[in-house]
Amino acid sequence: MIEINELLKGARVLLVEDEALVAMLVEDMLADQGCSVVATGARLDEALGHANDLTLEFDVALLDLNLAGESTFAVASALVERNIPFAFSTGYGVSGLPPEWRDRPTLQKPFTGGDMARVLTQALGLTEPPRI
């Protein structure tokens, strides 16, 4: 059976998180899964800039739902326009999302590295190959 970290190995991630300690922890978790963080956004304008930067190449984004009181739905919309998969990260879970965003993978805080890997795998549409 393939471990989730093998499915994510080499994935380039845009991390949007306003809490510095949480961002460092998530970066470590991503590194443990074989991912690399290509950019981090701690403010809405910074995150939106990364999401719209066509020269910044990333495979998936992990978006904290709330950056210093501002929602990241504008960032999510920019990623949808670019057809880049993403997952929300929030203490409120899926119930904290408006109906139009509830179909997106959502990582409930607090989370483990395994939880994060499963949600990113889901966002990327990666699945484990069938066992023979």
Image (cartoon, rainbow, N blue to C red):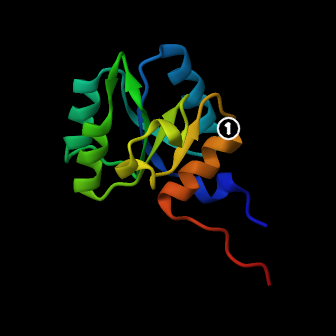
Q: Position of residue 4 (x, y in %)?
A: 68, 55
Task: Give the left or right position of residue 7, taking residue 78 as reference.
Answer: right
Q: Is 29 placed above or below 23 here?
A: below
Q: Is 28 placed above or below 5 here?
A: above
The three-letter code of the residue at mark 1 reads Gly
Residue 119 or residue 7, whichever sits in front: 119
Task: Give the left or right position of residue 34, taking residue 36 as reference.
Answer: right
Q: Position of residue 71 (x, y in %)?
A: 33, 29
Residue 58 or residue 82, whichever sits in front: 82
Q: Which residue is mark 1?
A: 113
Task: Give the left or right position of residue 68, taking residue 128 as reference.
Answer: left
Task: Give the left or right position of residue 48, taking residue 132 as reference.
Answer: left
Residue lying furthest bottom: 132
- In the rendered image, the quadrant that contains the C terminus is bottom right
- Secondary structure of the residue carrying tag 1 is helix
The residue lying at 67 percent from left, 38 percent from top is 113
Q: Position of residue 18 (x, y in %)?
A: 41, 19
Residue 77 or residue 94, whichever sits in front: 94
Query: Dividing the picture into quarters, in which one does residue 51 lie?
Result: top left
- In the rendered image, the quadrant that contains the N terminus is bottom right
**How crowded is the residue under tag 1: few (<14 C-alpha within 10 Å), some, or many (20+)?**
some
